[in-house]
Amino acid sequence: MLNIGVIGYGYWGPNITRNFSSTEGIRVSMVCDKRPGALRSVQRDFPSVEVTTNFEDVLSSPKIDVVAIVTPVSSHFELAKRALENGKHVFVEKPFTDTIEHAEILIELAKMKNLTIMVDHTFLFTGAVRTAKELIQKDVLGKIFYYDSTRVNLGLFQHDVNVVWDLAPHDFSIMDYILDEKPAALTANGIAHVNNMEDMAYVTIYFQSNLIAHFNVNWLSPVKVRTTLIGGEKKMLVWNDVNPDEKIKIYDKGVNVENRETLYNLLVSYRSGDMWAPKVDPTEALKLECRHFVECIEQNKTPINDGEAGLRVVRLLEACNESLKDRGKLVDLSGMHVMSA
Amino acid sequence: MLNIGVIGYGYWGPNITRNFSSTEGIRVSMVCDKRPGALRSVQRDFPSVEVTTNFEDVLSSPKIDVVAIVTPVSSHFELAKRALENGKHVFVEKPFTDTIEHAEILIELAKMKNLTIMVDHTFLFTGAVRTAKELIQKDVLGKIFYYDSTRVNLGLFQHDVNVVWDLAPHDFSIMDYILDEKPAALTANGIAHVNNMEDMAYVTIYFQSNLIAHFNVNWLSPVKVRTTLIGGEKKMLVWNDVNPDEKIKIYDKGVNVENRETLYNLLVSYRSGDMWAPKVDPTEALKLECRHFVECIEQNKTPINDGEAGLRVVRLLEACNESLKDRGKLVDLSGMHVMSA
Amino acid sequence: MLNIGVIGYGYWGPNITRNFSSTEGIRVSMVCDKRPGALRSVQRDFPSVEVTTNFEDVLSSPKIDVVAIVTPVSSHFELAKRALENGKHVFVEKPFTDTIEHAEILIELAKMKNLTIMVDHTFLFTGAVRTAKELIQKDVLGKIFYYDSTRVNLGLFQHDVNVVWDLAPHDFSIMDYILDEKPAALTANGIAHVNNMEDMAYVTIYFQSNLIAHFNVNWLSPVKVRTTLIGGEKKMLVWNDVNPDEKIKIYDKGVNVENRETLYNLLVSYRSGDMWAPKVDPTEALKLECRHFVECIEQNKTPINDGEAGLRVVRLLEACNESLKDRGKLVDLSGMHVMSA
Amino acid sequence: MLNIGVIGYGYWGPNITRNFSSTEGIRVSMVCDKRPGALRSVQRDFPSVEVTTNFEDVLSSPKIDVVAIVTPVSSHFELAKRALENGKHVFVEKPFTDTIEHAEILIELAKMKNLTIMVDHTFLFTGAVRTAKELIQKDVLGKIFYYDSTRVNLGLFQHDVNVVWDLAPHDFSIMDYILDEKPAALTANGIAHVNNMEDMAYVTIYFQSNLIAHFNVNWLSPVKVRTTLIGGEKKMLVWNDVNPDEKIKIYDKGVNVENRETLYNLLVSYRSGDMWAPKVDPTEALKLECRHFVECIEQNKTPINDGEAGLRVVRLLEACNESLKDRGKLVDLSGMHVMSA
């Protein structure tokens, strides 16, 4: 039985705590937050869990095997480093770290100590992403032409990062998981309205082939839009995450480009072929992710969302900031998958 | 009573002919197309209209007051120039011309001869765009922060232009009509999959203020997506053109940024405030556009979609091509609204 | 070449005229309406068509082979009877007649004179209904358990009939066409709000087997709802006619009733299995119907929407009125498919 | 601090337990279920709660103040009667009881002992129903003309009741809460496909005025439909409970019945006026219901969902069974709101 300590009990901490609490093979032993009010919530909902306002209590406790770091990104590196140094496995919120260098140090450290790092790329465990991955692996879509994602909602919090670092880690990690190809270059355009941090941005990623990816992230919308189009030579997949009923739709092309009359009819139609919406598993993603983490530790396996996956996302995020500073300057990514070490 | 001759009877020509036929003050006298089959359709549907395979018959006919040019863009300049030289008003398909220079010559020519040019930016006459324009003019949305458009469908025709020149004229002309500010710089990224012409592209337009516009145009989708988000300081407008029932929705922000609990609740909500969907006038846009054209000629008024409007769109299109060639190079537009003459 | 005369040029008359005008093998020769304004519209849109305010001109003209009766139901019988007596084929608006007896007389008369009657059950020719019919014939749904239709919109006209006679003919004719079984008994409940005619009603039809059909018709809704659920032992078909994109959806059951856990999960899911939306032919229904009519006359074939089909609908309508009068009294229909003659 | 014991830990019991656990002023002390597996779940999720397989332990425990009965309807009466006799407040699943008589006895008993009965009509506490109630109270819709509900999903469980008793209590209780008028007569039609219990049914309720209500309940659909239309003289409210984003929509009529042209345009439109979708409070309904229950006990107030509300629903359910037996026989309800005592 593993014992986990959770550092940070803000918006996401309670979900992490609840899910690890109901995962076989692991027990939440301690929760740390600086705010006494947060700890009172812990005590009410999880009476058997120890609480503390000092994260050192978690990091140094001999009974703790695993540390979950559910704090702002600027603190991830220090907390994760201390945890790994103390021989503890690490579950850390996305984005993994605030710099590429920090990510590389943590990966190296975990490797040396044979510890497991999992970066909380929760979406990889949703039924929708698992279905999309499976369909693409089975070549249902054919050669992939584009990956086009829109993630838009209201984000009015006091952020320590811009909208790209807040929202794009979701989409970058999903793209990284679903597509086989590796990014070659990137360009990002964005703007700040409320303070000096970008609150909306558009990112285009070029690949070696003629695959292209695009990301639209935006904090200034009172309504949620969460749509990803994945266009293939044979079919297109549309993932609409705010549709409770039909999250994944697969559209046939259904047209014969040789036939002129067909093409004319097409212009006034809404779609050209059949559509198919596979039933998507509604199991809570975080629940499956917690299980995967425990399983990886127990069986010494590499998580699908390990430190390397986290690093690949951080590389894209850093490149975005570089491009944003110069209004869409093209940033080369060709060296990004070689570990610096 | 004006007499109009229509050159080009392909996909859009029959709509043009039908709508001018039922417009007061104008009569379709002649239709020209090189394909005899097209002319047989004209004779069946409009028995009283003269037909010809030679566009010179239209351009030189003394009874013709107005020429509608419904042909590929590469032929617009020559046909329009000849028509204007012969003293005829010109209704021309979008995009206006294939180069900035050509547009400027036509504008100058029309000015000298006191003739009217209308560029067929049909969408300006839809109920949706008129409603959006009106709401923005009444300051319902507050200061505009962004204009974000997606226009995606299957486009398998043998095109003589790329996807930007095919689809973006719609959106550029709408943005030009709706927003008061003028573009300052532009960047475009895109890629070609099927032949050497871009079949999908992403365009970002910067303005002097912190307004930003973005355009997602794509020919490789078996399903139509036609969505425009216009985000303002006070409210957001969502225009979904494939929704027959709720084309325009206005979302309130509805949140108090001071209240921490409200903000937390927000993360699990789909939207933050009330939504309102005004009834949009379903009158056919082309019908209103034809009426506006006749009215402008009769009363010597400037159309909202005159040659200048067409030129502003062509400037953006040229800049897109320049940026596309260099993977998102920033193209300065600051001089674009000064007529070269 | 057949010559058709159209009597009645109100809301639907122009559509009838336009569609017969573009149908091979038939020509619109005459249009009759009592209102001179309506006839001016005819002359503008169809300059070669003769107009008259006297329906006798149509009924007695020797050059007319076919009469289209596009008038209120109360006049159908007299006009159709006169047309048939004069040796003309009849195309008549739904519902066929105002009484069963009238329908039977017309059918008998047409039979004697070897003339064709077509009742304008336009929906039978929509892509959606043809797709549904085909899927059911191929046994995709399995044994049919229920047919459940909702047709709701604003209907504020001065009607000479109640909402059942206005809206239910669409659904009764579709059900009659799609299902193989014959109705056994019927019950109808409804109420009048604005005047003394029912403006909303609920009709349940029992069959010999445990198939059941239900119809919800309502004039008091500012938004259109047009949904039909057809539930089978294997799958369910949902036809949403106001959805431009996904008119027909087929839902798999996708559950194993033996598995308790599956069933529990089901309660919080939106659906239990895959969904499939076949592409539906967008060709205008009325166009296909006109073609079918001409073909039936030319080849002496029986239309799918002949007088008998019209009569079966009128029998249901009469039974509805009988049941409505007595708040849902069960009306036996077992004798309804035996011709009274 | 009140102490509650929960009897029944099947599908709904865990929700009841979780919600009372986090309600101020009450503590879950005991959970009873006959299945040891269910009790193991209790012990894992709520370590401090006592468990038992014998409901007598709950009913007779002196420390228990309140009993929650979360068992099949056939057992409600005996368990509730025993609980009340032992001086305990009762929270009971819907439907309240299996007969009118049983409901009356329980109400009488609670009155005599000054105990509180709450029937779990959870939907009354949803944001959607509270919003609808409020809008109707403020006369936003005008005089109510109809209440039209559809509740359709897959229901394959081994039920001890038919589909009306399973699904209609939700809708009957909502209608009872929202509308001021009292039912006058009822007719129900339905059919059984799988076994001898109705698995789909249609219920029409007449009122003294020309208000009418209709309920479509169906277990044979692989997709959920949960729509309620409430039509008023001024506006219509549409509640679509499977829409996460726009649960409540209010439609204006927006037409002037005097204007003939407007009416013609209407026929081809999707709706006639503006639509407005108020933001609906997403707070979990059961949480608010638990709070209301505790508040009513503490302050000796009558719950909005008291025994009388439960009885009114049971009266409708009994009348449905009577009508179903005789294919839609009209059942008089005029005496139903006089307590038999």
Image (tube, coloured by chain):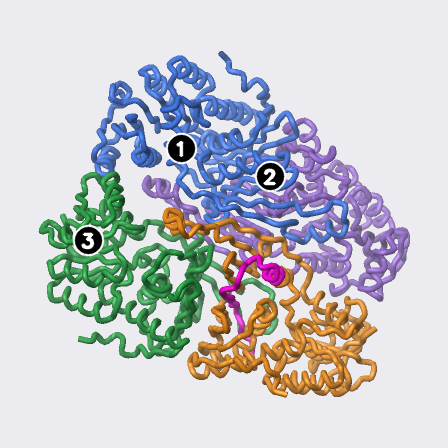
Chain colours: A orange, B green, C blue, D purple
Q: Considering depth in this image, is C100 or A325 the residue closer to the camera?
A: A325
* Percent x, y of residue C259: 76, 48
Q: Nearer the viewer, mark 3 or mark 2?
A: 2
Q: Nearer the viewer, mark 1 or mark 2?
A: 2
The verdict on residue A97 being magenta is no
In terms of image quadrants, where is residue A9? bottom right
Q: Nearer the viewer, mark 3 or mark 1?
A: 1
Q: Secondary structure at mark 2?
A: loop
Please state which amino acid type lies under the numbered disc 1: Glu
Please state which amino acid type lies under the numbered disc 3: Val
Q: Considering depth in this image, is A232 or A92 the residue closer to the camera?
A: A232
Instruction: Determine contact: label 3, label 2, CB under 8 Å.
Output: no
Q: Considering depth in this image, is D38 or A276 the residue closer to the camera?
A: A276
Q: Between disc 1 and disc 2, whose residue precedes? A: 2
Where's the C terminus of chain A, which quadrant?
bottom right
Please give the label number shown on residue B180.
Answer: none
* Residue at image coords 30%, 79%: B334
Neighbor class of circle 2 (other Cα within 10 Å; few <14, some 14-19, many 20+) is: some
Instruction: Determine contact: label 1, label 2, CB under 8 Å.
Output: no
Disc 1 versus disc 2: distance between alpha carbons?
A: 26 Å
Please give the label number shown on residue C140.
Answer: 2
* Percent x, y of residue D175: 61, 44
**Residue lying farthest left?**
B62
Q: Secondary structure at mark 3?
A: helix
Magenta-drawn segment:
A132-158
**Residue beneath label 3, please?**
B294
Q: Is disc 3 in the same subunit as disc 1?
A: no
Q: Is residue B258 above or below residue D116?
A: below
**Residue beneath label 1, please?**
C289
Disc 3 versus disc 1: distance between alpha carbons?
A: 38 Å
Please state which amino acid type lies under the numbered disc 2: Val
